[in-house]
Image: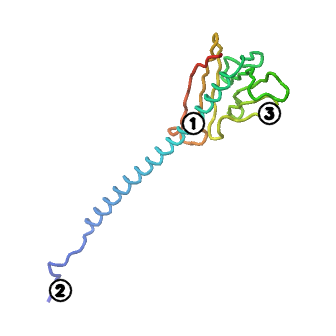
């Protein structure tokens, strides 16, 4: 007698196994794509927020310094230049026995950082090490100072994730 299998024996055929593996691979590839996309989106949001925070900080400090100043000291100011510097005469944070002092806000193009330098003090960086200052341009128009600032993140290596933001504002002198 020939050995026959009964009809109720159920197993996977090779074709069914290949279909199952294909479906699992397609679902896994789709899930991996969306996971990678969400990581990139999160990185982009974080770098953009870092650049925004630094730009707002620079403009807030710059606005406060200029509004509290007596005048713009033009002999040491570098106007209409993308690596600009503004020097102001002020009575804020006076050194001992002085009636007036000078504060400088400038872009150091070597390390792409914006600094605040008060007379007799070391320069204080206004931008973080994770942000590159691309441009700090000052234009003096009548009693106003037009500030053009461009910042970019330094950390992101992929071009599509790089955040570059440009601000242009006008600050009135007293």
Label 3 – label 2 distance at C-alpha: 98 Å
Kindly check if marks 3 and 1 are in contact, taking CB atoms under 8 A apart as contact.
no
From the image, tell me which residue sits under label 1.
53
Label 1 – label 2 distance at C-alpha: 79 Å
- Coordinates of residue 144 in the picture (x, y in percent): 62, 15
Query: Residue 161, relative to residue 173: is it above or below?
Result: below
Secondary element under disc 1, as helix, strand or loop, is: helix
Number of marks in picture: 3
Kindly identify the residue that appears in the image at 35 percent across and 58 percent down.
25
Pick whichever, 44 or 6, lies toward us.
44
- Of the two numbered discs 3 and 1 in the rendering, the one whose residue sits closer to the viewer: 3
Kindly identify the residue that appears in the image at 65 percent across and 14 percent down.
140
Q: In which quarter of the image is the C terminus?
A: top right
From the image, tell me which residue sits under label 2.
3
Kindly check if marks 1 and 2 are in contact, taking CB atoms under 8 A apart as contact.
no
Label 3 – label 1 distance at C-alpha: 25 Å
Secondary element under disc 2, as helix, strand or loop, is: loop
């Amino acid at each position: 007698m020939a050995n026959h299998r009964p009809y109720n024996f159920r197993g996977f055929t090779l074709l069914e196994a290949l279909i199952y593996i294909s479906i699992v691979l397609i679902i896994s590839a789709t899930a991996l794509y969306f996971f990678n996309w969400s990581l990139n989106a999160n990185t982009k949001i974080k770098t953009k927020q870092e650049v925004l925070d630094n730009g707002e900080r620079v403009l807030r400090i710059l606005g406060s310094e200029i509004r509290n100043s007596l005048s713009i000291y033009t002999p040491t100011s570098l106007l209409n230049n993308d690596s600009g510097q503004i020097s102001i005469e002020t009575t804020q944070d006076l050194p001992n026995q002085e009636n007036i002092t000078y504060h400088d806000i400038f872009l150091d193009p070597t390390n792409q950082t914006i600094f605040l330098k008060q007379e007799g003090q070391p320069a204080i960086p206004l931008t973080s090490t994770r942000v590159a200052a691309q441009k700090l341009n000052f234009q003096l128009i009548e009693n106003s100072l037009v500030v053009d600032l461009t910042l970019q993140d330094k950390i992101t290596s992929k071009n599509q994730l790089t955040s570059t933001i440009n601000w242009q504002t006008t600050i009135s002198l007293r």
